[in-house]
C-alpha cells in the first residue's frame, strides 16, 4: 500500500498494461510518482509492463474497472485510460467497450472523489465522429452516428466526457479531459488492426498493404512521446475543458501506405479493400488550445517517429511474437 508523501505522488493508471498506459506509467515513474496499474488484459499485454517487475514504486492489480474499484492507497491522481481503442478491438468487444466507458469511468471518478485525487480522462478525436468541421477544434460538438458500429466507442467516450464534467461541476472533482488523435509507437500490438501496426506488419512480412476505401481519407499521426508529454502537461494544468493532443501533420491513408513502402524498402504493394462503415473521411487536430494553455506542441517528426516504430516492429515480426 502507498501512503501520502509530499515528494512522491501516487498515481493510478487504468488500462496500465496497454500501449499508452504503459508509456504513461514509465513517464510518471521518471517524474517521481508511485504508480498502481489496473488492467484486465482485454487488449493489453503483460510484456508492456514486464520491465516494471520488482520496482518498489510500482504495483499491478489485475481487475476489470467496470466493476467497483477498491484500493487501500492514498491517491493523488487517477488516469483513466482503460478501453479497447482500435476499431477492430471495439467491434469485437462492443459491450465491454460501452461498459468501461460508462461504468468504468463512473468507478474511476468515484475513486478520485473518495480519495480527493485529480481525475484524468483519456478521450478521443472519435468524439468528433465523421467531422463536418476541419481541422477539429474543441468547441466543435461532432457528427457521430450513435447506432452505427463505431457508436459503441464514440458514444461511450462522449458519455465519459459528460460524466467527467458532471463530477467536476457537481462534486467539485479536479478533472482533465484529453482528446487524443491517432497516436503510434512501440508497444502497439502488431495485429491490433490500427493502420500503423497493420501497414508496418504487412510491409515487413511482404504482404500487401490493405488500404480501406480509395485511401483518400486522412489522418494525422502523433508519436507516443509527444502525446505523453501533452498528457503530463495537461494533468499539471488547472484547465478542465477538453484539450486536443495530436500532431497536425495530415496525410491521406494512401500517402501513409506509400511512406511505409518507401521507408521499409518492402516489395509489398497497396491493395484496396472496402471502407468500413462510418470511417471518418478527415481528421486533423487544431492544437491552438494546447499551444496557448499548455505551451505544448509535438516535437517528433513523422519520419523519425515512424522509423523508431518500424525498428520496434522488426523485432516483433514472426508467428511466435504476434
Ligand atoms: P490499448 O488497447 O493498448 O490499451 C487499453 C488498455 O485498457 C488495455 O491494456 C486493456 O486491456 C485495458 N482495458 C480495457 N478495458 C478494461 C477494463 N474494463 N478494465 C481494465 N482494463 C481495461 O489502447 P491505447 O491505444 O493504449 O489506448 C489507451 C486509451 O487512450 C484508451 O482509452 C483509448 O480510447 C484512448 N485513445 C487512444 C488513441 C490512440 O491513438 N492510441 C486515440 C484516442 C484515444
Ligand atoms: N485503415 C486502412 N487499412 C488498415 C487499417 C486501417 O486503410 O489495414 C484505415 C481506416 O479505414 C482509417 C484509417 O486507416 O481510415 C485509420 O484507421 P485506424 O484503425 O488506425 O484508426 P481510426 O483513425 O479509424 O480510429
Image (tube, grey):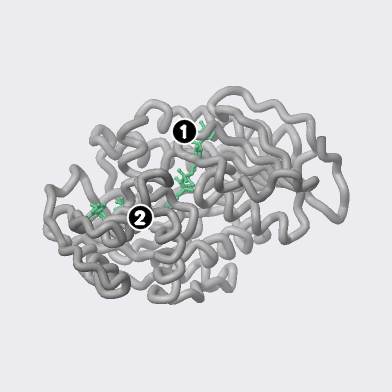
User: Compared to 131, does 16 lie above or below?
Assistant: above
Q: How many residues crowd mark 2 within 10 Å: few (<14), some (14–19), many (20+)? A: many
User: Dividing the picture into quarters, in which one does residue 131 lie?
Assistant: bottom left
The local secondary structure at tag 2 comes to helix
- Read off the residue under disc 1: 42
The numbered dot on residue 197 is: 2
User: Compared to 124, does 167 lie above or below?
Assistant: above
**Near-viewer residue (65 or 101):** 65
The local secondary structure at tag 1 comes to loop
Whether the residue under disc 1 has CB within 8 Å of ligand 1: yes
Q: Visible in this render: residue 165?
A: no
The numbered dot on residue 205 is: none
**Near-viewer residue (301 or 100):** 301
User: Compared to 56, does 285 lie above or below?
Assistant: below
Q: Residue at x 32, y 32 (%)?
A: 92
Please state the total of marks drawn on the protein image: 2
Tell me, yes or no, whether the two marked residues, 1 and 2, touch with CB atoms within 8 Å: no
In the picture, measured across the screen, residue 13 lies left or right of residue 224, that is: right
**Near-viewer residue (18 or 314):** 314
Q: Residue at x 39, y 76 (%)?
A: 303
Q: Position of residue 189 (x, y in %)?
A: 42, 48
Quadrant containing the C terminus in the rendered view? top left
Q: Earlier in the sequence, mark 1 or mark 2?
A: 1
In the picture, measured across the screen, residue 211 lies left or right of residue 245, that is: left
Q: How many residues crowd mark 1 within 10 Å: few (<14), some (14–19), many (20+)? A: some
User: Compared to 179, does 264 lie above or below?
Assistant: below
In the picture, measured across the screen, residue 229 lies left or right of residue 261, that is: right
Q: Visible in this render: residue 249?
A: yes
Quadrant containing the N terminus in the rendered view? top right
Q: Residue at x 51, y 73 (%)?
A: 297
**Near-viewer residue (116 or 215):** 215
Amino acid at each position: 500500500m502507498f501512503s501520502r508523501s509530499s515528494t512522491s505522488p501516487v498515481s493510478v493508471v487504468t488500462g496500465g498494461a496497454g500501449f499508452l498506459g504503459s508509456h504513461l506509467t514509465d513517464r510518471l515513474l521518471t517524474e517521481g510518482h508511485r504508480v498502481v496499474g489496473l488492467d484486465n488484459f482485454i487488449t493489453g499485454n503483460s510484456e508492456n509492463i514486464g520491465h516494471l517487475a520488482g520496482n518498489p514504486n510500482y504495483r499491478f492489480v489485475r481487475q476489470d474497472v467496470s466493476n467497483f474499484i477498491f484500493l487501500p492507497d492514498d491517491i493523488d491522481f487517477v488516469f483513466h485510460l482503460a478501453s479497447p481503442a482500435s476499431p477492430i478491438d471495439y467491434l469485437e468487444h462492443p459491450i465491454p467497450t460501452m461498459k468501461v466507458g460508462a461504468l468504468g469511468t463512473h468507478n474511476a471518478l468515484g475513486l478520485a472523489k473518495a480519495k480527493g485525487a485529480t481525475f484524468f480522462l483519456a478521450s478521443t478525436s472519435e468524439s468528433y465522429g465523421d467531422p463536418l468541421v476541419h481541422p477539429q477544434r474543441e468547441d466543435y460538438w461532432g457528427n457521430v452516428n450513435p447506432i452505427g458500429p463505431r457508436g459503441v466507442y464514440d458514444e461511450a467516450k462522449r458519455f465519459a466526457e459528460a460524466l467527467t464534467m458532471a463530477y467536476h461541476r457537481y462534486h467539485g472533482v479536479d478533472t482533465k479531459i484529453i482528446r487524443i488523435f491517432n497516436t503510434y509507437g512501440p508497444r502497439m500490438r502488431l495485429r491490433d488492426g490500427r493502420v500503423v501496426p497493420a501497414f508496418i506488419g504487412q510491409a515487413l512480412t511482404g504482404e500487401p498493404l490493405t488500404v480501406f476505401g480509395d485511401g483518400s481519407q486522412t489522418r494525422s499521426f502523433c508519436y507516443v512521446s509527444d502525446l505523453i508529454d501533452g498528457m503530463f502537461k495537461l494533468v499539471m494544468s488547472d484547465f478542465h475543458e477538453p484539450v486536443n493532443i495530436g500532431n497536425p501533420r495530415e496525410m491521406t491513408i494512401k500517402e501513409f501506405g506509400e511512406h511505409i513502402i518507401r521507408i521499409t524498402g518492402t516489395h509489398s504493394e497497396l491493395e484496396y479493400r472496402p471502407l468500413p462503415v462510418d470511417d471518418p473521411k478527415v481528421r486533423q487536430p487544431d492544437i491552438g488550445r494546447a499551444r496557448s494553455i499548455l505551451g505544448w506542441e509535438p516535437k517528433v517528426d513523422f519520419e523519425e517517429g515512424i522509423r523508431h516504430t518500424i525498428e520496434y516492429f522488426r523485432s516483433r515480426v514472426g508467428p511466435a511474437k504476434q
